[in-house]
Image: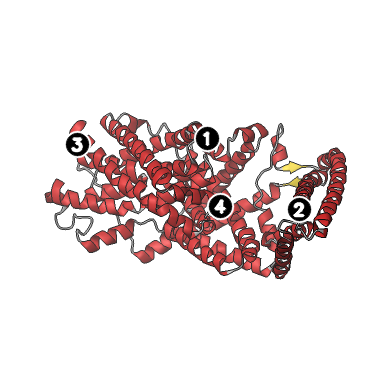
Amino acid sequence: MAENGQTPEFVTESRMSMWKQMGKTEDWWSIWLAGLFFVFVTACIFIWKPPVQELPEYRAIMNQEMEEAGFRTIAYTEAEKKLKGIKARSEGFTKTLRSITDRPKGWTANPIKSIYMSESEAAAKREAAAGKLEQAEKNLKQARAEAEEAENAAGAAQFQDEELNKKARAAITEWRQAMSAYSSAKSAATAQAYNLIPSLIIIGLVLMLFFAIGGKFIGFNLKEYFIGFPVIFGLTVLSYILSKQATMSALGISYVLFGIFIGLIIANTTGVSKSIKTAGQTEFFIKTGLVLLGARILFGQIALIGLPGLFVTWVVTPVVLITTFWFGQKIIKMPSKELNITVSSDMCVSGVSAAIATASACRAKKEELTLAIGMSMIFVAIMIFLLPAIANVTGMHPVWAGAWLGGTVDNTGSVVAAGELIGYEAMVVAATIKMIQNIMIGVIAFGVAAYWCLKVEPARACQPGQAPIKLTFGGALAEIWYRFPKFILGFIGASIIFSIMQAAVSMDWGNAMVSEGILSLANRFRGWFFAMAFVSIGLSISYQDLKEPLRGGKPVLLYIFGQTFNLLLTLFIAWLMFMVIFRDITEKLMLGA
């Protein structure tokens, strides 16, 4: 109700045509930028191509040795080593491109060691490791001689004597272990001085310009962006440095936690300037990174997650929404139905995007939308840390935990951050579940608009020019498509393209050119995108700005009830789907099927 005679401001949206969306929204620009990245990197690996013509020769040797001996012989192992050594990422400019994405290294007492080591320090390391290298070399020669002797004995018996074969396998296994020990000793004994400062400056500039391309069309204030981006990137580097400290690394305290905590400290002490807010494009960084991630995940894996994921999202979400709205109306008697439904959808679907869509559909007041979004930010800041901690302490299966996070944590960036705190498998499942759930935004917006027009306030919501959505089947489809997060098309498209590519070539060629070429670089850049997003998440959470929502009384109670119900129901349905009914799918996901 309006106060002091003022007319309340309702939430409205000015909609863009699809063509404008394709050129002016972060969802589409995450696709365009990821596509530009893939085209550039693909060109690099074909221009600076590794000797893939040698792959069939090494594979033929391996097949022949396995056919004759029935186990991995010395010749098999040597051919395998040469085969695996053929990598697109180790050639020409591709190698240079990969080197500039190097992250800070591990350190114990002096953080400078993470980015710089002098020649004198490297020489000291080489001298200290020289004795171990000499011993490792002796062990390797001895193990090689024993392996040759055992294999020759087995070969003299045409590999028909099982006892001799067993001895040969054991000796060759010891030789492989000696090779691994020698490789480690050689790495330490040939330590080189390094200075990552120039490469960090270069990758920082590359990333700044990369996202500025999309930012120009999306509508960034580029002056503010260019001022703020070095701060975002500098804090990202700092989060990597802190996570590489030996004790922190041993405790599993990752760059995700440090990134968010650093951002939180700054946001709640000195505050965040306009330029830093402009540069801290959490969703843009995350969405672009997710499109790159799609290339790594075979489409079969996405399809596997999809079936049980539909139950976790499309069944749980409407149940939670309706139950929470009922609780607000019947139990705690929320004074505003519009605030009730906006908070309910914000909490159970996808945070800000769902809140805006719902507020527009029911024509909620702007202050009601602000309140709903404020509460969402508060609880997201808690859930990012709390849910992964619960999952890790209780030993939850990563797929189950990922599904739980994807169905409950608001907004995609926070879901990825929470998933990373558990592990890669949990992150992939969580992100995929969240993308499936995001499709519900349009469905819920249409449902809310229809309910308000037909049941709640037909006189106001459905009068000519006021209904935000056409209440027809076509209108429903149009709303679903309009609200559909378009970056998901890029994620799925990348998965399909690279799945077809991998299926169309030999396993060895695909490994050398795709896995150890395009995807290797994509993974490195994705890591930087996500790390910048995690810092940006922390910088966006100012508890000083969020005090007002906590004074809301009934809205806070509504959110707590709904989120508690959501957490428990999603936990149960995720367990039922991934750990009981579709347990075989969970096992395939863990195997990377």
Q: Disc 2 marks which residue?
A: 165
- Which sits earlier in the primary sequence, circle 2 or circle 3? 2
Helix, strand or loop for disc 1? helix
* On screen, residue 125 above or below 513: above
- Which sits earlier in the primary sequence, circle 1 or circle 4? 1
| Labels 1, 3: front one | 3
Q: How far across and how far down the image is residue 475, in percent? A: 24, 61
Q: What is the CA distance from the residue labelled 3 to the residue labelled 4? A: 44 Å
Q: Can see residue 43? A: yes
Q: Disc 1 marks which residue?
A: 261
Q: Disc 4 marks which residue?
A: 526
Q: Are marks 1 and 4 in contact (CB under 8 Å)?
A: no
- Name the residue at 27% across, 61% down: 477
| Labels 1, 2: front one | 2
| Labels 1, 4: front one | 4
* Left or right of residue 517, residue 381 in this image: left
- Name the residue at 29% across, 40% down: 343
Callout 1 crowding tier (Cα within 10 Å): few <14, some 14–19, many ≥20? some
Q: Disc 3 marks which residue?
A: 329
